[in-house]
Amino acid sequence: MDFPILTTMMLVPLAAAIACLFAGQASRVIALGATLVTFGLGVMLWANYDIGGAQWQFQEKYELVAGFSYALGIDGIALMLIMLSVFLMPICILASWDSIKKRIGEYMAAFLFMEVLMIGTFAAQDLFLFYIFFEAGLIPMYLIIGVWGGDNRIYASYKFFLYTLIGSVLMLIAMFWMVSEAGTSDIPTLMQYDFPGGAQTWLWLAFFASFAVKVPMWPFHTWLPDAHVQAPTAGSVILAGVLLKLGGYGFIRFSLPMFPEASADFAWFVFILSMIAVIYTSLVALVQADMKKLIAYSSVAHMAIVTVGLFAFNVQGLEGAMIVMLSHGLVSGALFLCVGVIYDRLHTREIERYGGLSINMPYYALFFLLFTMASIGLPGTSGFVGEFLSLAGIYQTSSLVALVSTTGIILGAAYMLYLYRRVAFGDQKNADAAAMKDITAREWIMMTPIAAVVLWMGVYPESFLAPMRADIAALDAQLAAAAPASDAALASGEPLSEAANAMEFEGHDGEGQH
Amino acid sequence: MLDFPSSFALITPELILIGTGLVLLLVAAWVGDKAARAVTIVAASALFVAGLFTIPGLHLGVDGPDSYAFGTLLKVDSFALFSKALIYLAGIGALVVAPAFFNGPAASSERGLRAEYPVLILFATVGMSIMVSASDFMTLYMGLELNSLAAYVLAAILRKDERSTEAGLKYFVLGALASGILLYGMSLLYGFTGGTDFASVRAGLEGELSTGQLFGLIFVMAGLAFKISAVPFHMWTPDVYEGAPTPVTLFFATAPKVAAVALTARVVFEVFGGQVQAWQQIVMFTALASIVFGALGAIGQDNLKRLLAYSSINNVGFILLGLAVATPAGASSMLVYLFIYVVMSLGSFTALLLLRGEDGNLFETFGDIAGLAVTRPAIAWALLVFMFSLAGIPPLLGFYSKFVVFQAVVDADLVVFAAIAIAASVIGAFYYIKFVKVMFFDEPAGVATGKAETSHWVLLGICAVIVSPLGYLLTGSLTDLTNKAASSLFLAI
């Protein structure tokens, strides 16, 4: 057997987490070291991933007696999401370097546990193992929000916990049914299993309950603004960056391949919720006075583009959804970091308290501008690639949905530019805001890598699409039979009897006869 | 013809316990409370030795005619052995935590640990041993009453404490009522079937149930439901749990639950095994009602012991859910749940016993444990593990216990019940995470003082390790044992 790299990637942060619990102040260094090592392992994972090779790579499998197996393995989709997680993690640790003062060891331990669970969720190849990792993430996140969060943290932590739990327990029941029906809990096998049509509907709904809360889709999104606003900066980064992606990952890994017919039946249900989300949350974002809340609502809008792309039932839509997920993970994470940077200085997230930051914090304003543009989807940034592909995909299925979703993008530009204008441009209204220092070396180190990847993904998305291509093509082939009717596809009408530019032939006995 | 040598061989653990109990009773009478500590240690050792005698049988799996003792009075099969082992473990736990509590400042108005305490625990354990291996309604009732009488006294053992006395009295009055109901049910069954041993009652119940038989069944079920504190016969639980001294509460929450659940399982399968339809709906209703009421009732509680009482009602619901499935897998999952539940309860109560305020009194309310993560981090983390585990959040072992039960329920095509139960478990999660919230998110209230004995820490540590994800390593042998136990239960069907 080869080197068990996935297990190692989980063991490193796990060991570090336990060490952090006892390390006190030294835990910062331990956590940073461990996350960097994990990131290094992640880079190795990507480098050794054989694009175009077997669908499932780096497989590890040990039978557990507990009724399921410890089976890990990744395809291109999981690889990209694992990369996103391990990439954001060291940045989160850096973001909490100075701002977290109390109980630092426990804080770092919670983040490292989070990392273990996120890698585990994306790499799990056993249905129940997936559920364990998926659900276990509640514990550290509950603590992160509740212990180190803002003033209203207790309400937010309860809401986060209970909302997410009620969604996922229904999924658990569905999983039991699937395993008892199919006789295996192996995910690759289940992806090929043909569940009976009537049951698919119920199973799809049970899984939807879980993933729709996680994504979150309108109207199940209300936990998100609370959780985001109250969580510490790094907590928001992980929430927006990775945890929301669990929902999208769930759709692409479970709902679509396992219940294609039900997915097709419910496609319009998803479209309608997504259309409402895109318009409604964008409008809500427009009137927010709190920066984090604004970005939180923008997350809901962006994730709606993901669900629209996923249920477009074509390659472009699926690829676009994946790129939007990756891009949103980076960009919204970076935006939360930007908020964190000024929050650490002024301890308020109120937009009105800032203004004219481009004067005293020019580098900060530059980064902020880049991420704002990426969020809007400016060509050249990662946001453009994802949104373009998603919308191109959905246009083939329904031009109406494409129209509404595009409106959301325009509204997105409105609220993001409006935010940027109020924070970075204009007068320096408050002396304390005007006296803030530009970003420090630590903050440079946090921002630069994200900025680089955002541009990389915007200019040459092929690097990110290539590993996923085969998997998405396979999924598309599986879905093709169930795909809903398309209103924008080329229709073959009555063939014309003559060429379109044919002219009436006159004078049969004219010049033709020599 | 009774075969005495083999019968006595089968009940060796009970003989050891009865013998030790009687000797220790004399010691307690002659030497007095000076010997309390030594008596406790001897009693715990006796339980341990008795537990050792269950191991060979557990390992090999005993069932069939070989497991009958004294004709058909007792049936010492794998199922009985598994339950006994669990009961003895819980008994040891209740003995280990006792000296520090009774000798501590909380019980200062009393004269410290009384030598009767370990003796009563021993007799209660013997009673439970007989309960789980009963295969005749007479032995069943003997075991039940031996256990109950000891338990009434235990609840009231702090004689000068009003709440303890009240708990004892309440337990006694309601317990006597339940015993009466049970006895009435048994007499009806005897009258309508002509036998008291399980096999002949079962034979008498063949075919359509007559009204009298049905009433007998219902009265028996009601009496048993009281003993396991399942809704709608649960209302004594919070009061007794709150009033009884904490080591006794720890005992009540574990050993008698195991015994009563095991007894119920044996009665429904071996006596009413042919009438699954008749009792399944009763048990299913009781299970779901316990889950829902246990979850809802706990929400408003401020007293930690009351909260854990509701939590035990809630957990009993899940255990009964496994029983209501009426399949070997369901019975096996029920036993897995029982084991994990016992470990979680032992752990949570031990943690509570470690927490004393400055005045030496045990912490009792949420206000007391506020900010515990700062003042006593080790205990707070242990409690966090137990609470998330009770809530059934993976990767803790409490998830596994719910996992097996729900798997059995869904496999038996009772998906709707599974959905109701699991939705109620989310309500239950609310107060478990409230526990965590108070300990971790709130500002520290008081300083927890009080030194505890090493034995507490050892017990807490063992429970925490079993409940942690490392506990999954145990699940293999656990499932093996519970499968054997469940299959011996289903031999009769």
Image: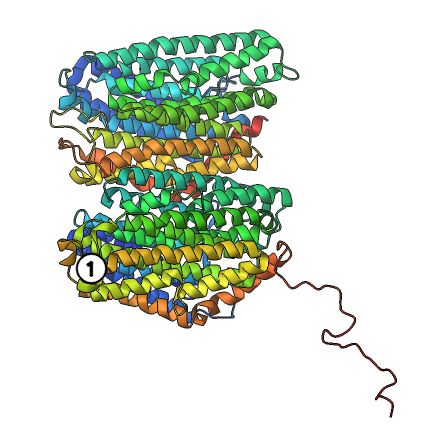
Q: Is residue A119 above or below residue B162?
A: below
State the residue in front, A346 or A495.
A495
State the residue in front, A508 or A63.
A508
Q: Residue at x 29, y 32 (%)?
A: B348
Tell me which chain the residue with mark 1 is part of: A
Q: Is residue A26 above or below residue A380?
A: above
Q: Quadrant of the C terminus of chain B?
A: top right
Q: Residue at x 41, y 17 (%)?
A: B227
The image quadrant that residue A88 belongs to is bottom left
Q: Residue at x 62, y 55 (%)?
A: A483
Badge 1 marks a residue whose secondary structure is helix
State the residue in front, B303 or B354.
B303
Q: Which residue is disc 1 drawn over? A: A29
Q: Is residue A504 above or below residue A293?
A: below
State the residue in front, A450 or A477.
A450
**Is residue B164 found left or right of A297 in the rendered image?**
left
Q: Position of residue B64 (x, y in %)?
A: 54, 28
Q: Position of residue B113 (x, y in %)?
A: 18, 20
**Is residue B387 found left or right of A96 in the rendered image?**
right
- Mark 1: which amino acid? Val
